[in-house]
Amino acid sequence: MAHTPASAASPAASLQDIVSHAKEYGFVFPSSEIYDGLAAVYDYGPAGVELKNNLKRLWWQAMTQLHPNIVGIDAAIFMHPFTWKASGHVDSFSDPLIDNKDSKKRYRADVLLEEKAAEYENAGDAARAAALLAEMGRLLMESNFDGVRQLIIDEKIVCPISKTANWTDVRQFNLMYSTQMSATSGEDDAALYLRPETAQGIFVNFLNVQKTARQKVPFGIAQIGKAFRNEIVARQFIFRMREFEQMEMQYFIRPGTEMKWYAYWKETRKKWHEALGTPAEKLRYHDHDKLAHYANAAVDIEFEFPFGFKEIEGIHSRTDFDLSQHQALSKKKQQYFDNDTDPATGKPFGNYVPYVVETSVGADRLFLATLCNAYRTEPDPDGKEPRVWLALHPAVAPVKAAILPLVRKDGLPEVGQRIFDELKYDFNLVYEDRDSIGKRYTRQDLIGTPFCIAIDHQTFEDQTVTIRHRDARTQERVAISALRGLLAEATSARRVLERL
C-alpha cells in the first residue's frame, strides 16, 4: 500500500474554503468562540491537533534522529529579562506602523509596500517589484521612516477601507508582550516578557547542552515551542497569529564555515517540505532585502498559499551575534574549545565563540500550507455535489484508518471492534458503524483518512476485509492478519524521511 500522491489538478481552493473546512471538520476553531472569539487566536480541534502533532513529530525526527549531532531541548517560555536586552529585542524588535487617519485602521508599512510589489510582479513587471523592495529595504535599514511614508504616497497606496492616502507618520511598534513576575505591582520593577521566539532558550543553554550531550562543533540544538508577538495586523487565518508555535534548530559551527552550512540547510530544508508531498512548483526561495540585526545572510522558503507566495520557513546565518551578546551582558564565557587542527597553522583552532545557522519553521504556517496543498475537489459525474477530500500523506494524516462494519448486525460490529482493539496500540483509528458505507467513506475523505477498512459477510468466510484507498477510491481484499503490516508500511515516517 505505498502512497501515491494524488493529483493536485483540482481547482485552487480559496482561503475561505480552507477556513470553512477547517472549522466544520474539527481542524481549527476560533478561540473563545462562544464569547465572539479573540482576534488572531485559534484552537486546534480533534483532527487538527493530530495533524499538527504528526507534522511536529516528523520535523523532530528529521532533525534529531537523522542527524546524530543534533539534540533537543525544551526551554521555559519565561526567561530572565536581560535575555531580551542581549538579543536586541528590547531595543529593536519592532515593525513600522502606519495609520490611515480617515478609516482609523492600522497597517504595517512594509506589508503595504510588499503587497504593492506583489501587484507589479503579478502584472509581469518583476523589475519594478524588485526595485520597490530594494528601496524599501534601504529606507528601513537606515530607519528613514519619513522616506518610507513618502514611498507609500509616491506608490499611490491607499487604505482599502477609506480609499484615501491620508497617512500618519510611520513609527516603530515593539512586538513583545510584557508582564511582571510578582503578584503585586511594584515588588519587582523588571519587566518579564512572553518570549517572541524560541531561539534564545537555545542560546542561553548552549554550553549546558554541548557539555552534557558531549557534542563537538558542528552540532545543533532543536526545539519546538510557543512564542508570542503583538502583531500590528494579524490576519489570513492561522498564517499570522499572536500566539504561535515554532520549530527551530540552531546549528553551531566554526567561524568562516557559515556559508557552506547556510547552503546545506537551505537545500536540506526545502527537500523536507517536498518529502511531505508539497510540489516543487509551490515552493520557492526568497532572499531577504533587509537583513535582521543579527544576520549576514537570510532566505525564506515560501509556499504558494491562496493569497500568494508567503514564508513558511526561514534559514538565517546569525554569525556569533547571539552568543557574543549573551557573553558580554552575562559576563560568562560562551566559548567552545576546538582541538581539531587548523590546516593553515597546524595548530588546534582553540577557543572561539561559534557562529550559528538557524532553521525556523512556523508550525501553524506549515499546518496551513499542508491543508491548502491537500485540499481537493472534483465534480460528481452524476451532477451531485462535488467530491471534496484531503489528500494528506498517510504519515501526517490525523486518522490512519477507519474500521467500518458494513451493517450493524450479523456479528459484523463485533469483528470490527476486535480489529480496532488489535490495531489501536499502533495506529490512530476510528470505529464507526452508523449511516451508509458511502456516507462514512465521505466523512473520512473530508479529514484525510487514507484507508477505510470495511468488514462484510465475506469476512466470516475467509478472514479478509476490503481496504478502500482514499485518493483513487480503489478497493482491494486483504487478510485481517496482514492489516498491521500493511498500515505500518504505508503510514510510517520512513515514507517521508527516506526521501531526504
Image: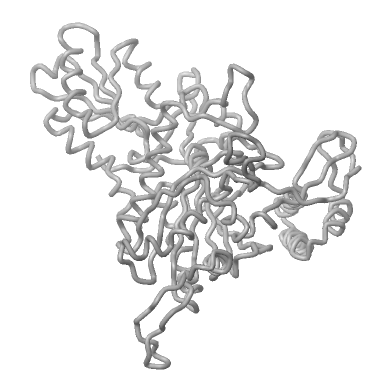
Report whether 69 appears left or right of 39: left
Q: Is residue 181 visible?
A: yes
Q: Is residue 124 above or below residue 296?
A: above
Q: Which residue appears at 60% of the width and 45% of the height?
A: 192
**Where does the image place residue 74, in percent across and percent down from the top left?**
41, 48
Q: Is residue 372 above or below residue 361?
A: above
Q: Is residue 348 above or below residue 55?
A: below
Q: Quadrant of the C terminus?
A: bottom left
Q: Is residue 369 visible?
A: no
Q: Is residue 484 above or below residue 119?
A: above
Q: Which residue appears at 39% of the width and 31% of the height?
A: 448
Considering depth in this image, is 469 or 412 the residue closer to the camera?
412
**Where does the image place residue 250, in percent across and percent down from the top left?**
46, 61
Considering depth in this image, is 206 or 119 the residue closer to the camera?
206
Considering depth in this image, is 227 or 314 the residue closer to the camera?
227
**Where does the image place residue 455, in percent across and percent down from the top left?**
20, 19
Q: Which residue appears at 16% of the width and 20% of the height?
A: 418
